[in-house]
Amino acid sequence: MSSLFDLSLIDSTLRMMAPLLLAGLGGAICARVGIFNVGLDGLMLMGAFIGVAANAFTNNIWLSILIAVVGTILFSLLFGYMVIHLQANMIVTGIAINFLSIGVTTFALRTIFDVQGAYYNNEMVGLPTWKIPVIDDIPLLGNLLSGQSPIVYLGILITIAMYIFLKKSVLGSHFDAVGINPVAAKSQGIKIKKIQYQAVIISGILCALGGVQLSLGQVTMFSENMTGGRGFIALVATMLGQSNPIGVFLSSGLFGFTEAISIRFQGLNIPTNFTLMLPYVITILAMFVFKDRTQLNAMKNSQGSSR
């Protein structure tokens, strides 16, 4: 049991929660402007594939991240155009984006790399691990916090920055105003569609980073539908966190911890099917235990007010 719950479990939790945190923050910024983004999983999947594809051709990890971000932004704008301009149903559009991303990435995997199932190249370089100079020398703290990929640290910084942005800045208050009452916000001269597009673009950037962490951070490969529903777990983290960056961080930490534990269980001769389903079971249980009707009603109201 001591080998199951040790200090390295925290290290694994931080690594596992990073994609969930980034996608959850993307969902939170959309929820703030009245958009319920169900397409987080599809956006993450696109970011994961484009990052691997760009890395295979450029052999430059930083350029690959940039290309993945740009490509996912374009994909997220498709979602934004249908929801904001065409007034399409948010739930249906988000699910369509998820299925479209699965189809596009599967087709591109077979067309570009001529493989089925997964693409792996042992010459491809993944995300580096950074040692934090001062913290790395501290006995316990160095083992817990140092040695993660830059996207893990970036996720923590983005959480803090988004919290300050939403709570302290004028533009952040405009985001909240659009989500709470778009009619009143428009009467104050706030450009509703511009704010919503900005939120969708930010969501695309964050989901791209989460996808790159999956394909080039945790592993160095791409497999079909490799997100495995993490975008939906991130959506639950958004709801449990009440679209508050700190709340999303804590919720993502819970699910990241569950995923890390499920991997540990695989080494204890526990059936693989049980360990794989554990994060999703915890997600469902969390929805029942921590459910908040106010948040759900707010999302329904925001969806109705944008029509």
Image: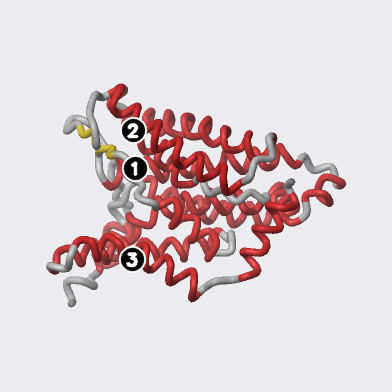
Are the residues flagged by discs 1 and 2 in contact, CB closer than 8 Å? yes
The circle on residue 106 is 2
In which image quadrant can residue 275 be found? bottom left
- Amino acid under label 1? Asn
Disc number lying in front (1 or 3): 1
> Which residue lies at the image location 84% right of the left edge and 51% below the top edge?
184
102 left or right of 237 in image: left
> Which residue lies at the image location 31% right of the left edge and 32% below the top edge?
52
Query: Crowding at label 2, few (<14), some or many (≥20) Cα neighbours within 10 Å?
Result: some
In which image quadrant can residue 61 be found? top left
Residue 92 appears in the figure? yes
Q: Which percent across, then down, holds residue 204?
A: 52, 40
- Amino acid under label 3? Thr
Element assignment for label 3: helix
In which image quadrant can residue 87 be found? top right
Pointer 1: what residue? Answer: 225
Element assignment for label 2: helix
Q: Is residue 178 above or below residue 14?
A: above
> Which residue lies at the image location 42% right of the left edge and 32% below the top edge?
68
> Which residue lies at the image location 36% right of the left edge and 67% below the top edge?
281
Q: Is residue 111 above or below residue 287?
A: above
Pointer 3: what residue? Answer: 258
> Reading the chain from its start, which is encountered first: label 1 or label 2?
2
* Residue found at the far left of this picture: 269
Q: How is the image coloured?
A: secondary structure
The circle on residue 243 is none
- Amino acid under label 2? Thr
> Reading the chain from its start, which is encountered first: label 1 or label 3?
1
**Depth check, front residue: 49 or 172:** 49
Residue 54 appears in the figure? no
